[in-house]
Amino acid sequence: MKIFRKKKDGNQPKSRIEKRVSTIGTYDLILWAENALYVIGKEITHHQRDKNANALYEAELGAEALLAIVRELQKRSND
C-alpha cells in the first residue's frame, strides 16, 4: 500500500486520500468520517452474510479513508 511507504528522509509522501482530506473543511470531514464508519460496518456485515471478498476490499478502503481523516483532524487540533 502506498500509504505506508516512507521516503529515505523518513517522511511519508502524501497519498491521494491524504491530499484530498487536507482540502476539505472540518465539518465535512466529520461527516465523511461518520459515513466511513457506516460503510465499514455495512461491508463487514455483508461479508459475514455472503462471504463476499469484495466487501472486505470496500471495508478496507473505508478504513483507509477514516484513518486519513482522523490524522488530519488531529493535525488541525494541534495547530
Image (cartoon, rainbow, N blue to C red):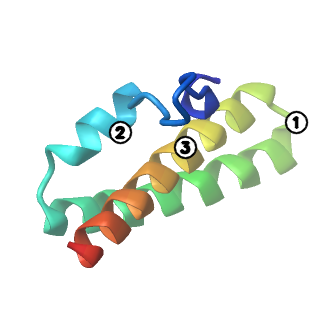
**Distance of label 3 from label 1 (alpha carbons):** 21 Å
Which residue lies under the disc numbered 3? 64
**Distance of label 2 from label 3 (alpha carbons):** 10 Å
Q: Which amino acid is tagged 2? A: Glu
Circle number at residue 51: 1
Q: Residue at 52% across / 29% down in the picture?
A: 9
Query: Residue 63 at what x, y percent from top left?
Result: 58, 49
Q: Which image quadrant: the C terminus?
A: bottom left
Choose top left, top right, bottom left or bottom right for residue 34: bottom left
Q: Which amino acid is tagged 1? A: Lys
Q: Which amino acid is tagged 3? A: Glu
> Sequence-wise, which precedes: disc 3 or disc 1?
1
> Sequence-wise, which precedes: disc 2 or disc 1?
2
Q: Residue at 54% across / 43% down in the picture?
A: 64
Choose top left, top right, bottom left or bottom right for residue 32: bottom left
Q: Nearer the viewer, mark 2 or mark 3?
A: 2
Which residue lies under the disc numbered 2? 18
Query: Residue 12 at what x, y percent from top left?
Result: 49, 34
Residue 48 in the figure: left or right of residue 44: right
